[in-house]
Image (cartoon, rainbow, N blue to C red):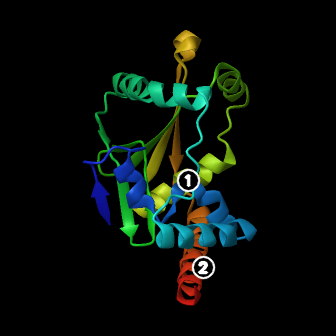
Amino acid sequence: MKIYTDIQQNTPEWINLRLGKFTASKAQAIGNKGAGLETLAFEKVAEVLTGVSAEKEYSNVNMENGNDREAEAVAAYELETGIALTAVGFIEKDEHTGCSPDRLINTEGVVEVKCPSDPIFAKYLFFRKIDPAYEWQISMQLLITERKFADFVVYNPNFKEKALQIVRVERDEEKIEKLRIGLEWGVQRKLEILSKV
């Protein structure tokens, strides 16, 4: 495992590190090992052959707000918990697999930060449920980093005293095993496709 702390997320260097790799942002497709994983294998092959990321550089106001607020969310988390977090660019498990947790907690945890719009934050406060795609993402981060837990941080400063929500997520070994199986299949499929194109 290699940890890149000198590269910032969403930079050209970070995008290049991810080329051809199965990453936690697509963990749900990997864990479910269906048609989405087949599509993902072809995307990874295309990235290897072209050097161009298959992920669209799509952005909207909500995503930009989320990116702008991440540092504020991290500061609020550190103030609330007394834990100093470590920024990380990318964590490479091997030449085929990696992830980009928002922060690391000492040697045992990761932090995943979401800064949703007001309506989505209100919905989260009401239901208190983590989106399944984020659950898969967290599980893959824990698989790759070999860490014990994740703190899922939801932040929106417009909600005053409820602005910061922290949920501790322990390793889900059942999900992690599904991810292992999906990654093994996806990597083999990627290599098979590469051998024939």
User: Relative to residue 118, is residue 112 depicted above or below?
Assistant: below
Task: State which quadrant residue 136 falls in.
Answer: bottom right
Q: Which residue is mark 2?
A: 185
Cα–Cα gap, marks 2 and 1? 17 Å
Give the side of residue 3 with respect to residue 178, left or right.
left
**Kind of residue sitting beneath label 2:** Trp
Binning the other alpha carbons within 10 Å of mark 2 as few (below 14), some (14 to 19) or many (20 upward) gives some
Residue that appears at 69% across and 27% down: 120
Asked whether residue 165 is in view, the answer is no
Q: Which residue is mark 1?
A: 25
Task: State which quadrant residue 104 falls in.
Answer: top left
User: Relative to residue 191, is residue 91 depicted above or below?
Assistant: above
Front position in the image: 172 or 69: 69
Residue that appears at 57% across and 12% down: 158
Q: How far from the left and from the top, in percent, is residue 159?
A: 58, 13
Asked whether residue 143 is in view, the answer is yes
Q: Quadrant of the C terminus?
A: bottom right
Q: How far from the left and from the top, in percent, is residue 21?
A: 48, 66
Binning the other alpha carbons within 10 Å of mark 1 as few (below 14), some (14 to 19) or many (20 upward) gives some
SS assignment at label 1: helix
Front position in the image: 126 or 47: 47
Q: Residue furthest front?
A: 50
**Kind of residue sitting beneath label 1:** Ser
The tag on residue 52 is none
Residue that appears at 61% across and 50% down: 135
